[in-house]
Image (cartoon, rainbow, N blue to C red):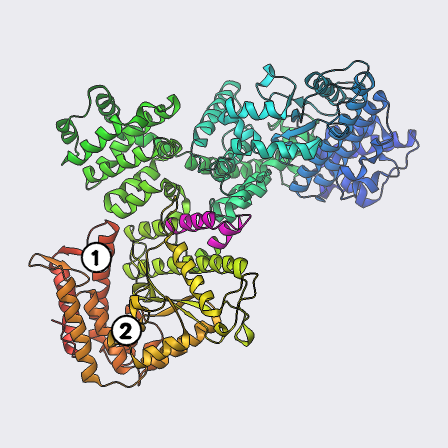
Amino acid sequence: MLEPPRWPRPTAAFLNQRLSRLEVGCRVASVPFHADAGVDDHLSSVLLASDFAYQNLLRDPQLLGPDFLQLMSDPRHADARAGVFNEVHDTGELRRLLRRFRLREALRLIWRDVTGADAIETTLAGASVLAESCLEAALRGAERQVGERHGVIRDARGQPQRMVVLGLGKLGGGELNFSSDIDLVFAFAGHGDSDGARPLDATAYYTRIGQALVGLLADHSVDGYVYRVDLRLRPFGTAGRLALSFNAMEQYFQREGRDGERYAWIKARPVAGDRVGGARLLDTLRPFVFRRYLDYSAFAGLREMKALIDAEVARKDLADHLKLGPGGIREIEFIVQLVQLIRGGREPTLRARGLLPALAACEQLGFIPSARAQRLRDAYRFLRRLENRVQMFADEQTHEIPADRELRERLALALGRSGWDALDAELRVHRAAVAEEFAALMAVDARNDAQQAQARWPEFWRALLADGVDAGAVAASGFEPPDEVVTELEALLGGAALRTMSARARERLDAVMPAVFAAACAQEHPARCLARLLRLVQATLRRSVYLALLEEQPAALRRLSAVFAASAFLAERVIAHPLLLDDLFDDRVDGDTPDATAIRDELARRLGMIAEADPEAEIEAIQEQRQSALFRIGLAFLGGRLDARSAASALADVAEAVVGAVLHIAERDMAAAHGRIDGGSGGEGSGLIVVAYGSFGGRELGFGSDLDLVFLYDGARAQRESDGVKPLDGARYYARLAQRVVHLLGTLTRAGRLYEVDVRLRPDGSKGMLVQSLDGYAAYQRERAWTWELQALVRARAVAGDAVLARRYAELRVDLLAQPRDAAKLREEVVSMRARWRAERDRSSAMEFDLKQGGGGLVDLEFLLQGLVLQHATRHPALLVNGANAALIDALRSARILGDAAAATLAHAHAGLLARAIRCTLDARPRVVARDAGVERDASAVAEACRAAGFGFS
């Protein structure tokens, strides 16, 4: 008997009574009763948690027989014991055995869950495997039953052709409740007639098998039933055929499939029968569930389903429903499934059927932040365990906490809580967390606020549609000057795309346009913003899922409007590549910008998803990642999360990752066509490096900048031939490899070019070879290089390619720049070249200042720093560590070549000029700005520093 301290006295008395009755029942049935303390304690926990277990053990004490403890301690799922069905050929016997098997395995699930032997994930998986084992046995029994009268249907090879049973819902996800019905769909691969005495066509034949299967599982007998079967998720629901061919299934989803069905079919999985054919069918249906593009129309389907659920909750007073109520299991599922439907077409790892694996994929890919994912994970595990325990009470499909206070106390105690109040408090915390996450996802408050802010704009849009565009009305609405807006509105309203829109797409447009007007009107430059937004609307009319994003997510539209008002560059990128709209919806957009390692890792992951070598697809994937990274950097800069120097450095990191990825593709293609050139003792690399010059080399890249590149190869390797079927001598091999890199970087794809490439900074400029040996490059730099070429070398660095050769290049660069020089001659040559450039390129005037070429501008600063490096590097090798302007200012200060005050002033001026330059490129404007006090101050500081160092550029 139980000791009082283990349970409250009333509970201990209740359990002692149950244990006593079981002991008596076992004695009458001559079944040994396990009365040792450990088994007694576990059994009492089961009896507390489950009336179903108690009643069945009392009704049939044989269940507590000698193999009882062995079964309870077996960690394997039910399929390990499903061999008992193999020798059963009688339908009546199968019917009894199925019910007996399910009962024993259900008791095992209760025992292991209640005693803590299994985690909730294991319990849910065990319940799913139990259902699959019963389904397979029942299907084989149904096939025998139908086959005795009608024969079998055979494929072209004469083999019996089985139908597939698809599990949807929680069965498909491998997370079935303890007492859940099972959502099934029956399908078959091909048509034909059965070969028996009474032949049937395929539809009738497999319908008979399906009906027999359902009867074996769901019909009630003295032994109960096995599972309730729900077939309403099949095509056309209750009005549809019980079994459909694969072709009919595919046609249905192409023509009739609804958004709500996509949610159901996320978890679809073959669970019995022709599993190979079922997997093939699901492959053909995948484009219906997971669209190839980012599909924000999934919001509409979710909103419709949630509205129906909320209406049912209100009608039936189900506010405390663990599954459907606010903060319940269904809201967690919706949060994860929405990400799956929006992005699963592009991210295969999101196609996981189970909720916890899908949530983990969302977290790993960054679509649900870790803290939010953990809240959802904790809530899901808690709610599913509680839901299972509620169902274990009486083996009933219920999702509601019992109203009876005594049952609530039993529920809480069996879950290890001190009482119902403690469990209820924990339940409320988890439900509140889920409800908060779901409300944020659906942007409930933001949508309500947006609807109020848009109050006057629906009438404005209706007037445009009815009466046409009136410049006066446009201006009066706040869009001045109206000319550009009028032009874009006329293009939108008069375009063929608007006239040919589907009814559904037109509804989306009518819903989003008032929001677009309201968002633009709230910006500092409403007309400029609206004109750009209208161009985006025109670009997305035929892909209205992007309109769905803007309609569903007011925060994304506000962010988009701010970006379009501030940056023509980013606006044009989005208009040309609407895929970038995804970044406005991504929670990560307001976080840290990805660093170089993260960019490389993401590129490698995306390229790894491309099954076969496909340069065009690979370049498009790289371009998408590049565009996304540039867009995020632009947003971070405009939002003040990145300063100018960090933004410029981040842009260089993106370019470096892209060049590295492209070089890898080019090396692979060359190896496939011509083999490789043996590295000998030089290492395992290809023997070629890509050297970045200019702003790329100096980590000060701008938006839209081209890349200054130089290609160098290992001269010793070039003495050999490649080892492929079509070998090339070394020089030609490396020339082809460099040409391939330049070609891939400049290839025009649907997503545009990666980068414009400038290779004129190589030795002898455009007259020289595209690629040179490192030794030839060294000889040129030592014997024939102009001073300006040595200046360019200050910022040069290897950004991709052979690691050993890159180290040799770095050593060569240091050696070249550290040579002693005549200071006076050096200053004269630097000043002379700067004067020539300014005469040719300076666009300054009395009212405007050229940020790059003007006196005291960014090029003056670069020439000053490069001149000082060339002058002092012999005595101060630390000047050669980092060629970036900001780093050089710090190094010159550390070397006491610049005083602290002068270095600080110069650094401030550099940051100010660079920030203005980046803002110009972001807004697609020339880097020429009105002269104001800030510009004049920064330019004067640079000019003064130049004069003080002996470089009088002005």
Between residues 644 and 280, which one lies in front from this camera angle?
280
Q: CA distance from mark 1 to mark 2?
A: 28 Å
Q: Nearer the viewer, residue 143 or 550?
A: 143
Question: Horizontal and vertical percent for residue 880?
Answer: 34, 77
Residue 580 lies, in percent from the top left, at 37, 43
Q: Which residues are magenta?
A: 603-627
Query: Looking at the image, which residue sits at the far left?
Result: 846
Residue type at mark 1 is: Arg
Vertical side of 264 occupied by 71: above or below:
below
The percent coordinates of residue 515 (x first, y second) are 29, 31
Q: Residue at x 71, y 25 (%)?
A: 227
Instruction: Determine which quarter of the picture holds residue 723.
Output: bottom right
User: Does the rendering let one see residue 176?
Assistant: no
Q: Picture quarter containing residue 791?
A: bottom left
**Nearest to N terminus: mark 1 or mark 2:** 2
The amino acid sitting under disc 2 is Glu
Of labels 1 and 2, the one closer to you: 2
Check disc 2 and report the residue beneath it: 789
As drawn, is 676 to the left or to the right of 90?
A: left
**Outermost residue, right direction?**
30
Residue that label 1 marks: 916
Magenta span includes 613:
yes
Quarter of the image for the C terminus: give it.
bottom left
Residue 594: mark in rendering = none
User: Mainly helix, strand or loop, the magenta region?
Assistant: helix
- The residue nearer to you, when weighing 490 against 880, is 490
**Is 70 on the left or on the right of 12, as rendered?**
right
Judge whether 609 appears above or below 503 on screen: below
**Crowdedness near tag 1: few (<14), some (14–19) or many (≥20) residues, C-alpha within 10 Å:** some
